[in-house]
Image: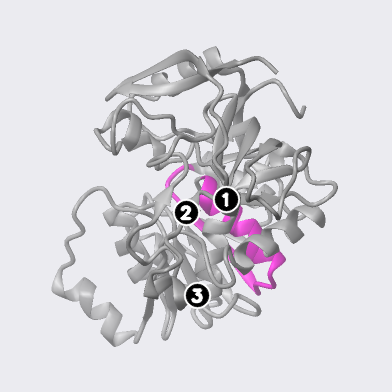
Amino acid sequence: MNKTMKQVIVKENNLLEITETSIPACGPEDVLVKVHYSGLCGSDIPRIFHDGAHYYPVTLGHEFAGEIMAVGSLVTKVRPGQMICCIPLVPDFSMPECERGFYSLGKGYTFVGSRLPGGNAEYVVMPESSCYLLPAGVNAKQGAFFEPVTVGIHPILLAGGCENKNVVIIGAGTIGLLALQSAKAMGAKTVTAIDINEEKLALAMTLGADYVANASDEDFISRFPHHQEIRFDQLILETAGAPQTVKTALAFAGPRAQLALVGTLHRDLLLGFQEYEQILRKELVLYGSWMNYSAPFPGKEWSITADLFINNQMNIDAIISSDTGVEEYVRQVMALAGGPANGKILLHWGEGK
């Protein structure tokens, strides 16, 4: 094994740089992973462009998969040669929230790919607890999608599942399109995708949406022919993370609908009294969804995701916009200039094709 590796660092705000450094050594409870694929997450955009990193320089990447190359002396559950994907949350298991299974809700946690070095490097060291073994037949490219798939499954589980419910996905980005497929596989009665981009809505149809609606028309709900049909037994997942899409969710919701807020807002949400009143008058049930974990750690979200890939129920190829090497990856990410990616940008380190 070479003693040095390449990595992509956020050197400072608005600057990605490829550097060479020593391959990190394992601590007693750590594993060394050779990264095959690492995906750009929407949450990485503010860390790169909007002063959102905890520190500089930082190596991002929390959606990744690869091969274990070495393990520390106290590691017992994994071994070199196994293929894993990253469970990025590193909880402080002594916290009372963790004792109740609320792993992402307690203090003291850290996170691979933001607070700790992540998978935008040829090699990464991380705790044994961050390893999720990939099942036989699931490849590293699919493994790089485990984390974002679990983000959409978590709110479904918070709401008691989606079987025989009319699931509405607001925001047909990567998380929304993965959640759409998950909901279909998990027994949803119907799945509706709402967005303002016709290309994304067309893609949602190819991925199994029963209905789509373009919300760019402010009267789209009254023009949507299936609204009455799916008014009841609704589970709405707001995945876009914009003030307007939260308002769209409130307006679209039917009586006693369950509304899970998944997308992270970066601007203030200002609700007028009539908008707020919809929560009361419709007796809506609201769920905040933060990350993707449950007891026992890392949770059923992850085993369900594994089953979806084993059973060929997830189409990731349609969502990938770029599968590229390190130089082109940096060029494409910097070209975003702080805006969202149109599809998943994958960094491929030359393994696992």
Is 34 on the left-hand or right-hand side of 89? right
Q: Marks 1/2: CA distance?
A: 7 Å
201 or 323: nearer the viewer: 323
Local packing at callout 2 (Cα closer than 10 Å; few below 14, some 14-19, many 20+) is: many
Q: Which residues are magenta?
A: 174-197
Q: Secondary structure at mark 3?
A: helix
**Residue 47 visible in the snapshot:** yes
Q: Are marks 1 and 2 in contact (CB under 8 Å)?
A: yes
Is 280 on the left-hand or right-hand side of 322? left
Identify the residue shown where x is 85% and y is 46%: 137
Mark 1, residue position: 130
Mark 3, residue position: 158
Residue 177 pos. (x, y %): 57, 51
Q: Marks 1/3: CA distance?
A: 22 Å
**Residue 210 visible in the snapshot:** no
276 or 352: nearer the viewer: 352
219 or 306: nearer the viewer: 306
For the residues carrying marks 1 and 3, which lies nearer the camera in this image?
Answer: 1
Q: Which numbered marker is on residue 120?
A: none
Identify the residue shown where x is 40% and y is 19%: 335
Reading the chain from its start, which is encountered first: label 3 or label 2?
2
For the residues carrying marks 3 and 2, which lies nearer the camera in this image?
Answer: 2
Name the image quarter holding residue 6: top right
Asked if the magenta segment contains residue 13, the reply would be no
**Residue farthest along the front direction in this orientation:** 73
Mark 2, residue position: 90
Is 151 on the left-hand or right-hand side of 279? right
